[in-house]
Amino acid sequence: MFMKKRVLAAICSFCILLTGCSLPFGNNADQNAASNASIAGGSTEASNEASSEASTEASSEASSDASAEASSDAAASASSDSDNKFGGTLTEASDEEMYTLSRLYKIVTYENYTYDDDKNITSRYSFESLMLIDDCKESNPDLYKTLYDLASDNGKTYKKYIEDFTDYAERNAQYKPEEALYYTVKVCPQRTADQYLSYYEFVEDNYSSDVLSSGLVTFKYGHTYDIYTGEVVKLSDVVTCTPKEFAAKVYEELTDAYPNNSDWNNAESDIQEYVTDSSKEYNWYFGVDGIHIVFNPGCFFSCNAYYEIVIEYNDEIVNKDYVYNPEEGYAYVDDELEFINDKSFSGTGLLSITYTQSKYHPYLGTAMTVTNGSKSATFDNIEFDINRAKIYHMVTAESKEYLYVFTDDDTDKQTLYVFDVSGKDIKAVGSQTFNDFWLDEGSGDYAGEPCFMGPDSMISVDKTNVFGTISYYFPATVSADGMPTKLTARCRILECSDKITAKEDIKASEVDKDGNVINESITVFEDSVVQPVYVDPEHYVDCLLEDGTVVRFEFTFEEDKVFVDGEDVNEIFDGLVYEDEE
């Protein structure tokens, strides 16, 4: 069996330390985390306990864990397998592109599903958290810790209540088999292309005690941070008017967006409490189009969904320092764009995505179709889990918009389907399958899958068997045809064989930390331990020796064999382990 061991890097990663102005920030992110805990538990008493315990336990543990982990190096760089090429022409990263590559993100998920005998979902309990990958924590220690603490809070809440949720789900399946039980937290990135990171957590809940009698209830919790300091952005810094004027503006926007709504009978006075009550803070986030203010169920009305308004960036009350103008493109996730069974789809006139249900399993799709009005495009003869698909809107600097639909299966493979939704026609651009999609598996609970944050801030994971089985990741950008293009050929290794030794003296070259050859001829002596750290699957592997030297073994290929220094790698290296070796 392929031994998955975390590679510890003793050389510098490609991440660049960026500096910027330090501004005083803060908003309701801590309250949002507490709110998530408070509605996760199934009882009010337990919820309050989760909120306080997650807040104190997690912050202290996460602080010490993050600081301890920060002392160990991981790493980063880029590319794809010779048998599984990332579409397009290789483009080396420019200085501006490296700005985005210094912050690469992952989604960490705690989840549990239960199914009935017919494979229908009977319950789903899941928490997603947004984090920087381990290779970026040294260059972004403050933002890393902020996101780590939030992920820790979610993890503690999940572990505290998963047993209660599962027990309740089993009882619910007996008495209400037609009603699946849900508590899910989904991360939806919104503003990702400048100094401010903003996203919201989308919560669907029909389990917690506060909502059990109301059916499925939806919530949004906004998070906005300065990427340089990791501090929460204060809404009071974002708008230039007084709190009283802002409350009036919010009420005006609410009544305009939702006219003739009975919930507004007392809303004006309720909103004014945000002016006088210091314990109240607006729930908000930066969207692509402006400042989004969200009022969740229970704020000052009773219903199953939130109300949301947008104050556009060009509004006179918005501080121009916070206007979003992503000239190089941007990405976002829309919680409203979810898979619909094509048998129940009658058309909405809006951008929609449907699936054809497998006749064997209700949660599997065998085709996916994107529709906008009368136009549509389809990928068919495929198979994917509709509950595990992720959909990103990817908008380029040329204003081309693509849907990136990621799906995975039980074999640790992930397939990307790309649709062009820019013009009047919808086009199925292409697909790409990757042999792996897990980042930072050595981080235990904080392993995650890549999160695409923009056309020039994408990261994918793949595998190759050129030097034992190697799992590696690479940053990429959106090419002219809409498919991703790798930014660099030299890929950072995530996992590989645990202990590799040279069986004989082997010729190699010496490289510096950036992969530049500094000595074209060096001998790696017999019994030397070599630790792979970077790989270009088509050309070479860079390995760390015990004395800190980084050497490059160049590949040649003949049929299905890989050669180094004219000899089969399996003949001159001991310890190469392949995933298919059970």
Image (spheres, rainbow, N blue to C red):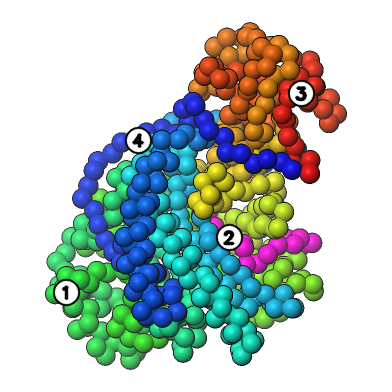
> Residue 274's x, y, as percent?
20, 74
Check if mark 1's residue and mark 2's residue have beta carbons within 8 Å: no
Which of the labelled discs sits on residue 277, or is there none?
Answer: 1
Quadrant showing the N terminus: top right
Q: What amino acid is found at the position of numbered circle 4 in the picture?
A: Leu
Q: Which residues are magenta?
A: 379-399
Label 4: how many Cα within 10 Å (few below 14, some 14–19, many 20+) = few
Q: What amino acid is found at the position of numbered circle 3 in the picture?
A: Val
Residue at 75% in and 78% down? 118
Q: Is residue 165 above or below residue 291?
A: below
Q: How far is mark 3 from mark 1, CA to CA?
A: 70 Å
Q: What amino acid is found at the position of numbered circle 2 in the picture?
A: Lys
Left or right of 220: which side holds 181?
A: right
> Residue 376's x, y, as percent?
67, 66
Mark 2 element type: strand
Prevalent SS, magenta region: strand
Is residue 396 in the magenta section? yes
